[in-house]
Structures are given as C-alpha cells and as structure tokens.
Image (cartoon, rainbow, N blue to C red):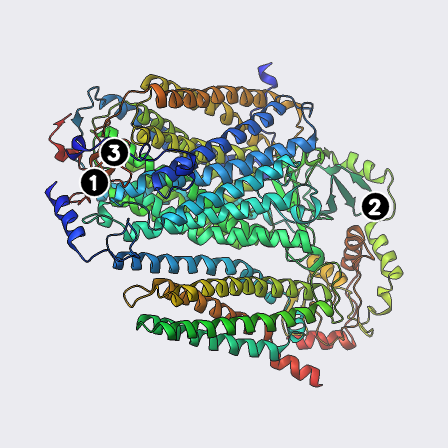
Amino acid sequence: MTTTVLPRVNYLNHEHGVASWLLTKDHKRIGILYLIVVAVAFFLGAIFAAGVRMELTTPQGDLVSADTYNKLFTAHGVMMVFFVLIPVVPAILGNFAMPLMIGAKDVAFPKLNLLSWYVFVIGFLFTIAALIFGGVDTGWTFYTPYSSTASNSNVMLTGLGVFIAGFSSILTGLNFMVTIHRMRAPGMTWFRLPLFVWAIYATALVQVLGTPVVAITVLMMALERALGFGIFDPRLGGDPVLFQHLFWFYSHPAVYIMILPPMGAISEVIACFSRKNVFGYSFVAFSSLAIAVFGFLVWAHHLFVAGISPYSAMVFSFLSFAVAIPSAVKTFNWTATLYQGAIWWRAPMMWVFGFIGLFLIGGLTGLFLASLGLDVHLHDTYFVVAHFHYIMVGGAIMGFLAGLHFWWPKMTGRMYSDGAATLSALLVFVGFNLTFGPQFILGYLGMPRRYHVYPDEYQVLNVLSSAGTSILGVGYTLTAVYLIYSLFRGERAGANPWLATGLEWNNTDSPPLPHNFSDLPVVSEGAYEYSKRGMKVA
Amino acid sequence: MPNGAAAHADHHGHHAHHPALQHHFESLEQQHEASTLGMWVFLVTEVMFFGGLLMAYLLYRVWYPGAWAEASLALDIVLGGINTAVLIASSFTMAMAVRAAQTGRHQHTVRWLILTMALGLTFLVIKYFEYAHKFELREVPGPDFEWHGQFPYQAQIFFSLYFGLTGLHALHMIIGVTLLAVITWMAAKGRFTPEWYTPVEMSGLYWHFVDIVWIFLFPLLYLVDRAHGVAQVGV
Amino acid sequence: MLESIPLFPEQASSLAPEVDNLYFFVLAITGFFALLVAVLVVIFAIKYRDRTGNRVGAPITGSIPLELGWSIIPFFVSMAIFVWATVVFFHIVRPPDQTLEIYSTGKRWMWRFQHIDGQSEINELHVPLGRPVKVTFTSEDVLHSLYVPAFRVKADAIPGRYSSIWFTPTKTGQYHLFCAEYCGTKHSGMIGSVYVMDPDEYQAWLSGGGGLSMTARGEQLFQQLGCVSCHLNDGSGRGPSLAGKFGTQETLANGETVNVDDTYLRESILTPQLRLVAGYQPLMPTFQGLVNEEGVMSLIEYIKSLPAAPATGAATQTQAQGR
C-alpha cells in the first residue's frame, strides 16, 4: 500500500493558527468546524431538554414559570432541529468523508463550502441572540396565527436565524450534489459508490428542493408579523392552515435530511464490521432515493386533525404507509448483511446495534401515526414526542455517533478507548429507552405535548422519563470525555485501523493529506469487496 | 499503484494550467461542467423559493376570484407592460454578451453587459414609481391599508402577494445588476477567453431566470380576468 | 401504589373500543416485526461473532426473491392497517344523523360551551349517557384543539372555520378535556372536564338554569341586527329567504353551487360578498365586529330552526335557476 511511504504531513498540521482554520477551503477542516459548532448547539439543546424534564418531574408547574417552560421547549426544539439534526451528518461526516470516499481532492465549490459554514454560524448567532434577549415561545414549528399575531417573544430574530441557517443547508446540498455528479475518481461509477454517498446524494435532493420552501414560509410569517401582510390571518380571509401545509412540505422531507445520512453511515459501519458486501446494495441505494422522493408527498399527515378533507387525509395516510416500505427494506437488508458475516464487535458496531433497536421502534410507531383512526387520538400527545425522538435521537444521533466512531481515527489519526465507547453506547441505549419508552404510554393515555402542568396520574411515568434523562446525560458526557481524551493520549490509528474497504482508508493516511491523495485514485471494484481481500472466510 | 501514477503523469502532461483552473479540478471542462450543473441546481432552489409564494397565490386566487379580479385591475398595466418589454430586451442583450464572450470579443462583451445593466436599472426605476404610487394610494398591506372595492380584506391578501412576489423579484434584479457590474469589470480587465468565460455564462443563466420569473408574474398579477374586468368597468 | 399508575386510558365512548382494537392490532403487527428483526440481529451478532477482526464474511451480495418478499409482504400488511384505520377514521369524522348539538368556542385559555337550550359553561361540559353528541366549535384567536382522551376524539379549533367532534358516551363519570394544540402561556391550563350523566340527571341539570335558548337568542339577534328587514321568509325581500335553507344547495352568482351549512352561513354573515346567491345584489354589509362567534352560532341555530316556507316568488326562481 502506498500510504507507508507518505510524508507525515496531513490536513491538520500542514498549516497552523486560527486564521488557517477560519479561512480554510479544505472540506475536511470545514467538517471539523461544523463539528465544533454542532457540539455547542447539542450541549445547549441538551441543557434546555434537561430543564424541561426537571420541570416535568412534578405535575405542578413549580420549577419554572409557564412562559419560561414554553421558551425552554422551544429553544430545545429550534436548537436540536435546525442546528444539530439537520447539519449533524451531512455537514460533519458528509463534508469530511464524502469527497475522500469518491476520490476527489475537494468538493466542487470549496469557497461556497466555507461560506455555508459562515452562513450557518451567523444563523446560529442570531438564534442565540434571540435566546439571550428573552427567548421565543412559539414551539419550533412557528404555527400561525400564534407566531404572527399573539406571541410577544423574539419570533423575528429566531425566524431570521432559522431562515439564514436554511441557506447553509441549501448551499451544502447543492455543493454535494455537484460534487457527486462531477468529481468522482476515474472508475468510480454510480454503482461502485459507497452507500453513504448515495444517502448524501438523496439528502442533497431534499435540501435543494425543500429548504427554499421553508425559507420563504418563515419569511412570509415574519412579514405577516412585522407588516400585517394577512396571508395567514383569518381576519382577512387568510388561512392559518396554509402555513402548516407550506411548513410541513419542507419539514417533513427535512426528517429525511436528518435520517438518510445516518442510515448511510450505518450501511458503511455494518459492511465494515461484518466484513461483507451490504446485502442488496442497489435496493439500499435506491431506497434512499425512494425515501427522498416519497418524502415530499406525505406532508399533510401532520394535519389529519387540522380540518383537511377526510379524503385527502386518506390519500396522505396511504402515501405515509408507502414511505415506510423503503425504510423497512433498509432494515431487512442490514439484518441480512449480518447473516454469515464475520462480525467484529468494536465500538462503532455497538452504536449500530443501538441504532437498529431504536430505529425499529421509532419507525414502527410511525405506523400508528400514519393510521388515520389512531392519529386522531395520538396527534399532539406524548406518543408523537416519543416517536420522533426515537427516530431523531435514537436514529439520527445514534447513527451519527456510529459514523463518528467509525471515522474518528481517520479524522484525528488517533484511537479512542473501545471499552469506554462500548459502555457509553450501552448507557445511551438504556437511558434513551427509559426516557422515551414511558412517553408512548403517556401519549396513549392522552397527555398532550407542550404541557407545563399535567394531571397527577401521569406523574410516575414522567418521573421515570426524567430519570432516564440523567442516564442519557451520563452516556453522552462519557462519549465527549473519551473522544477528547483520545485527541491527546489516543494510540496512533494508522491508515486503516478497521481493515475497511474504501478510498478514504486505503489510499491516504490518517489523518489524510491536505489534498486528500498523493495520486489520483483509480477505482476498479465495488465498494465492499471484502471477499476479494485474501483474508480467511469465517 | 501503477494506474494512479499513470493518471498523475497524464494530469501534469496535459495542457498547461489555465490561470482560471482551480487546484481540485482535473481540467477546465470538469470545472465548467461543475459550475453549470451547480448553477442549474441553484436555479431549481430559486424555483422552489418562489414556489412557496406562488402556492399561496394559487390557493387564494381559487378561493377569492372576485377579489383577485378587482385588486388586479388596480395595477398599472402600462408600466407593467413596459417593464415586461424592458426585461425581454435585457434578455436579448444578455444573450449577446454571452455570445461575444464566447467568440472572444471583449469590447462587445463589455458593451452588451453595460446595456443589460442599463435595462435592468430601467426596470427597477419603473418599479420604484409603481411602488411609490401604491404607497400614495395606501394600497400597501398593513394597518394603513385602504381599499374601496367590494373585497377590502381579500384585496389586502392580493397586495401582500403582489408586494411579496414583485419585491422578491426586484431583490433578485438588484443582485443581478450587482453581479453584472462585477462581470463587466472582469470582462473589461480581459479575464475571459473563448476557452473560459464561465462567469459570463452563469450570470446569463441567472439573468434569464429572473426574466422568466417576471414573465410569469406579469400575467399572474396584472392580467387576472382583465378582459372581463374592463368590460365591467365599461358598464 | 402500582395500581394507581394508569397504563391505559378509560373507554368512555362508543368510538373508544373501535380505536383500541385497532391499536392492539397495529401493536401486535409492529411488535411481531420488531421482535423478528431484533431477535435475528442478536442471533447473528452472537453466532457470527469474529473476535480476531481478520476474517471476512461469506460472499453474499443479495437475493432478488428476498428483496421482493420483504417489500411486498410489509406493503400488504401495511395496507391492511391502512384500510382498517381509514374505516375507523370515517366513523370518527362522520357524525350520525340525529345528534345533540352543542356549540363551543376556544380562546386563550378557556373553552366555553353553549347548549342549545341556553345553558353555557366554561371548561366544563355536561352530556347525557348513550346519546350521540356533536360539538361544533371555532377559535376566537389562535389555534386550539379540543381533545377528550377517554372518547378518543380530537379536532383543531381554527379561527375562521368550524370544526366538530362527535361521540356517544358509554360510561358515566368525569373525564379530562384538553387543549392539544399549543396556544401560548397557559396552554396547559386550558383544560377542563367532561361530565357524562344519566339522561334523567342531565335533564335535571339542563333545567337548572341558563338564559335564553340559542334559537331564541339567534332570533333576537336577527331582529336587532336588522337581518329581518331583507331576509323575509316568503322570499320577497332584498335578500334570499332563509327558511328551510339549511342543508340544501344554493346556486351562486358565478354559477357554482354551494352547500348551505354552518361554514357557508358563517362566511355569509361575516363576508357576504364572497359567495353571493344568484339573483341578488351585493347589498349586504359585513357583520364582522358587530357580532361575536357565539352570536354567529346562535344565528345559525335560529336559521336552522326556520321551517321551510311555502315556496313563492324569488325563492322558486332561484331554485329553478339551480336546476
């Protein structure tokens, strides 16, 4: 392998100083920059969540005032959705790994890539400013007419932050789409692409087609609030429900911006630690595209009780069941990939096992909500809260952590403690189920979401949920601790510590060279040809 | 890796580096293809961006056809018509600028670009007078909105969408003119060659897109039920 | 202690068992698939574990029959859920013909219920056992959502529109009533109770006070606001006769037809010109600001109560045009 003769100059040490980071056009460094901001946003979002859960340990609203509580869950939602979940995999792992995986020296538009990060940070700062100047209490969904007429919190500033951050997502999607189309190394045909790249591509489609719609919707809401436009104002004949249609037209596909890239990362990790081809490669690849396309056709399932016609509800319910199929196909294929594998139990794989367990529950409970007759009862209850946390945290964050543990040696050149990582995956899995499991029961009992005060009989389940949060908190903190520790004391990783396939592992060092490869890679085989490596079959 | 080495040699042995070739591309063609695809994808995002407002437009037009006809009549069809002609002309001059860049005639490129900018500015000035008139008449959505027709409330929604759509379009025009100013400066400096004039071509795509948006907005906003409406006023 | 932790909501309406049966069906199906995958993952992870990291798995790349199988079987299973759930949904959104009508308005942060006979109550709703009840409601400010978990019904209250829920209570008692759509500071305080009473007790409660019936109040408003001067019952007025119009179809000036229902009547009171009945001039002023939501509801209730007058003059003409 060529890596042994490479000089020990890499993308982390070839330039020094703050300016070399803030002005970098290197996709790998930009990925690290995103990692830092997203980590800060995740920390803040987690603090807000802790506030919410502490308040809910007692039925009375005795810890914080109602207004503070409303601002806490709004801040949690805005922070986690727009500044963690949407960028977490595409902007961090996508930026770092995707160009390496397709054998490119960089993304197609490196300056635009850096600009996207600055736009993201500006959006983030606006949102932080909104929180510092008193917060916002509309919920992350900004439903009109509450947001446009009734709320007297910092709706404008938050809306502006979200609007600006949206452009970061649009530009990143555009950049990745062009990169995947035009920057692949010789021989890297579409069906030799790693599945992570397929997932990033499908995500880019959603980012490009969906994000502009929510941007304009938030802008209309802001204009309505500032200038009295009247588009969503029933007093002028406007329709407040139109906002929900436009909002979910983006925000439902946005769910797939959050979950598709982690699914891609899961495919990579499973293939590597089972030492096998991903079962049904083309089905897994096309299911990503199918999810991206169908994802645009199901938005009104958020409006089943918002006065839409029962017949259109029926159509949207049907389509929502249909979009579940490609997700099921992925899950079955991952399971089949394990069959007759040589499964190496290392930390990234532990996160994958956690992901499969939680994503199963999250995905299948989605069927309850797609069922019209059940959704009437379950809509806007804790059942929904539990469902989307299983998908977003159980799925997206677990998937991100699987990917981060997988590529961490590549990013930093160092290994973390495998034992600590396995323990932390276990803690997160247990803590997560304890936190959100009881919420399914609370939801079917009828406890509405966004409640500051609740009837006494719901207390025991709420206390369980809050207790789970503390385990979850310990798990995440542990992850942060050993990862940071590994930066200073971790063992040297070597170019390919997992003996994985893929250009990022086999054609460059860890950490990679400043311009990724010393020689332009030429690809002559599929992404997961472990069987051709001359190793013993288990 | 012999293959890699061959590719490497090929890469360096090929045509000498064009000054505009960025390090991460293998060739000018690849760079040009990437820019073109990027621009088209960007235009798709723009379509979606306007799409949200157009969706609202469509919904309310179906709900309130009477109000739409009434409010649309208050728009100045003459100024709107002139502006349409101005923009179509500017699309022509833009196309000529791209052609001139492609054939390497710098002076022509600069002249056509300046003409395009002038037309763009003409559009904005006319739009300014249209807006100013609406402000005088208090036909601007908000607490001071006044309307003396049958549908005061729904007319306000029409004007919200009118200002939203044309305002967003005007913002795109302003960005377009600024962009052209930069391109003109680059062209005057002789940066473009028939081999590489991608920025001119991309600005052209953008400019045509903004024109096309107006070609949709003009009938949607100014010509709602105009024939029928005029007949009614005639009675 | 453990018995006091509820794990399942009470069933107190005829819809509740339907919804719960569906719930258990979906639970069984999803539980089966979840267990199937989870067990397989655990078995494979243990059985095929390789401690060395130096071996590779079997060279299996996929199987078309399997892919088709696990696409098509889940599809049909999900279609079974879809059909059942849709049937239940139509039961939930389609009230039976004869219902006890109750009107309600939500505003931050209370629910006001108005019984036809005149009683009104705040954050409490009294209904009789065993009789289908339909609550028609709207919001005076932002979005709300009327939710009674024990009945398994919910609908958003949207300003400018009417929504409704219906239920037949099957068990006496006191049940939670929630606002389920976030509406600001005291969202979680916008709660109350539904009291399901034996029919006799309910009658006693009804007669226990309250002012004018809604119809009477509607009639009063009809006089006060001057509606009566144009909408003459024999159809000879400047506006169409309203007698017997509720639930019929009307032809509009632009040639379309419209169902005369709550929503159309409300719209015609507040924005009369939007959908004008054919054959009439746009003379009616708007009553927006002159009558509140409950007033509109009373007017609608009054219009509903008007018996069909013998058709004469303009009314016949309109009907003839409609054909």
Viewer-side label of 2, 1: 1
Spatial separation of the CA atoms under disc 3 and disc 2: 70 Å
Q: Is residue C13 visible?
A: no
Q: Position of residue A215 (x, y in %)?
A: 53, 51
In the image, which disc is placed on residue C156?
none
In the depicted structure, whether residue A173 falls above or below residue C236:
above
Question: Which label's residue is closer to the chain start, 1 or 3?
Answer: 3
Q: Which residue is mark 2?
A: C118
Give the residue at mark 1. Answer: A518
Residue assigned mark 3: A271
| Alpha-carbon span between mark 2 and mark 1 | 86 Å
Residue C202 locus on image (x, y percent): 78, 37
The residue sitting at 38% across, 60% down in the picture is: B40
Query: Within the image, what quadrant is residue C58 found in?
Result: top left
Amino acid type at circle 2 is Gly
Asked which quadrant contains residue A355, the reply is top left
Which chain letter goes with mark 1? A
**Marks 2 and 1 belong to one chain:** no
